Image (tube, grey):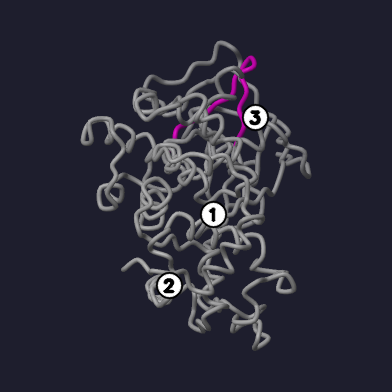
Amino acid sequence: MTPRSAPTLFQQQLYAWHKTGARPHPWKATRDPYKIWLSEIILQQTRVETGTSYYLRFVERFPAVEALAAATLEEVYELWKGLGYYSRAKNLHLSAQQIMTEFEGVFPDQYEDILSLKGVGPYTAAAIASFAYDLAYPVVDGNVKRVISRYAAYEKDILASAAHQDILDLLADGLFDAAHPAQFNQAVMDFGATVCKPKGALCQICPLREDCYAHQSGRVAELPLRINKVKRKTRYFHYIIIERAGELLFRQRQDKDIWQNLYEFPMIESYQQEALTHQEVATYLRETVGIMIGDELLHIKGPRQQLLSHQKIISYFYSGIEQEASEELSSDSPFVWMPADKYHQIAVPKTIDWYLHDNSISLFTLKA
């Protein structure tokens, strides 16, 4: 894109608004590509309000890329705990090591090299290139898509695969400021987050409303169009809590599935929403875990729902099973006993973390 000699009216109005409308996030005060990258990865699939505290903790614990690269994955997971989507943490760690080996410890300053980092897609690469190096790459997130769709009359499905390139083309047609990409990208993102909101857009104070197609045509609530809505697969997880002298039984997920490498309780996945029978729990424990139970009363908490991008996980938690302190697992068992000071530090899915910290939900008893 060729830098423009003078800002367009769209840019002028946007910049004038941004002088007082900018969001005060800590990563905006830096041009350090490492810190910008860190904030972008944390904010993937995470609200800004939640991600800010994690960003600050990461910067304090790992102030530079070499510190992150030298850490163990378990240390990164421990700091990431509660954010979910642990593949982001794993990719963050791998990329830090990649920067140390492939780029001699210096964060890359070219878009293609940034894009080569594990877990970095076109959006994140554009954000780092723009905010750290002021390279002329538009940053197209949901906020930007919404602003441009409404302003420039984009009436196609914003969830379609072609939508991203369509928005880039609209930006290139006199909207994007290639002379000041960092300033433009930050301004339009902040504007979409605080004024041109998904619901309750503040059109009455919008400086762009006179030239905004959606406002002038009364279609603000309708645009952007979302036709191909995400269809989520529903899965039912039945977690069995087994105690032994203050310890709980866990296993690490190894399959190429959600939550790979995270820890969870022994679990039965079913295709029905109803709770399992006592016999189903007993059979699973005998055949899979190697634990025998009698007619203990099993207390059930749930259901607990966790939404992922393409899956909905509904979980139940079965407790009331206690083993003798002398009970040991077989040498080839995939399960492991963990004391409280250990299992409160390991990386677990959000639904497990919820049970360990705040399991105040409906309780009923399953009798043999």
Is residue 153 shown to the viewer in this render? yes
Q: Main secondary structure of the magenta part?
A: strand
Q: Residue at x 37, y 41 (%)?
A: 91
Q: Which residue is mark 3?
A: 294
- How far apart are the alpha carbons under marks 3 and 2? 67 Å
Q: Amino acid at mark 3?
A: Gly
Q: Residue at x 61, y 15 (%)?
A: 324
Q: Residues within 10 Å of mark 1 (few under 14, many from 20)?
A: some
Q: Is residue 47 above or below residue 106?
A: below
**Of labels 2 and 1, the one closer to you:** 2
Q: Earlier in the sequence, mark 3 or mark 2?
A: 2
> Disc 2 on helix, strand or loop?
helix
Specify the segment rendered in magenta. 240-253
Q: Closer to the camera, 105 or 230?
A: 105
Q: Which residue is mark 1?
A: 308
Q: Amino acid at mark 1?
A: Leu
- How far apart are the alpha carbons under marks 2 and 1? 31 Å
- How far apart are the alpha carbons under marks 1 and 3? 36 Å
Marks 3,2: beta carbons within 8 A: no
**Of labels 1 and 3, the one closer to you:** 1
Q: Residue furthest top?
A: 326
Q: For residue 171, which numbered disc appears in the image?
A: 2
How many numbered marks are there?
Answer: 3
Q: Residue at x 39, y 48 (%)?
A: 128
Q: Quadrant of residue 24?
A: top right
Q: Closer to the camera, 257 or 27?
A: 27
Q: Position of residue 346 (x, y in %)?
A: 52, 27
